[in-house]
Amino acid sequence: MSKHIHLEPLPEMRRPARGNLPSQRYGALVGRIDHITARPRTEPETDSGHIFLWVEIYAGPYTGHYECPILTDPHSEDETSVRYFLHTETIPHAQLPSIGFWEDAQLSYDALRLDRKHFRPVLDGSFRSTFMFFAHTCDQLAVYGTTYKEGNGLHHIRRNPDGKGKQDGAVAFYFRKPGEKPIRRWVFLEAKPA
């Protein structure tokens, strides 16, 4: 029989997340990259200051696809300054996070002793390219932030401007190679008026 006969309906396309996450809760969303877009799911036009990372949780009670806006460029209209810090470390296998959404997560830039001297400004688009490279080559990732009211995404993925000590946002990319310890690459972000 020929492998070139295609007369069956195509499978149904994946739908966006339907609000499985708890509403407006801080936590860590752990899964794998699904895709990246230049526009939010609710807007017809692109957003030049963000990329929209879609994270897939493929098992458990939070199975779905979730939008995570990442601030990658300054906003000229409100003169926001975007700064970032990248940190790479080797970790034991026991520190690889489990898939899901974890409300017991804690992340503090102050506790990590991250201050202004660690961060560099986003100037020429190189940060966006680096971020997308990490996203497309990692084995899994953890996004720290606050869930949307509708429960279908995570935002505030940066230093928390409200000063909530253990609820800062960031992204951790995990890379594994057989016979080697995993590598975690952190992306820390802050946005302040210029």
Image (cartoon, rainbow, N blue to C red):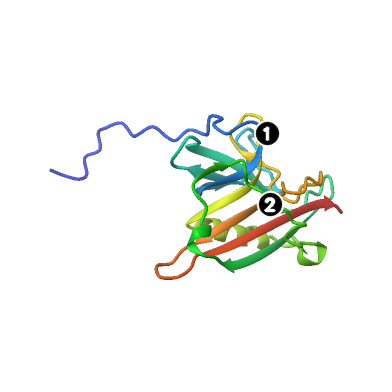
> Residue at (76%, 54%) from the top-left corner?
190
Look at the picture and state if 10 lies above or below 48. above
- Nearest the camera: 82 or 24? 24
Amino acid type, label 1: Gln
Q: Residue at image x 21%, y 40%?
A: 5
Q: Nearer the viewer, residue 91 or 144?
A: 91
Q: Is residue 137 visible?
A: no
Q: Is residue 175 above or below residue 6?
A: below
Question: Between 112 and 169, which is closer to the camera in this rendering?
Answer: 112
Total numbered labels placed on residues in the image: 2
Q: Secondary structure at mark 1?
A: loop
Q: Residue 48's x, y, as percent?
A: 70, 47
What residue appears at the point 54 percent right and 65 percent down from the top-left corner?
Answer: 91
User: Which numbered marker is on residue 107?
Assistant: 2
In this orientation, which residue lies closer to the viewer: 103 or 178? 103
Q: Which residue is the site of mark 1?
A: 24
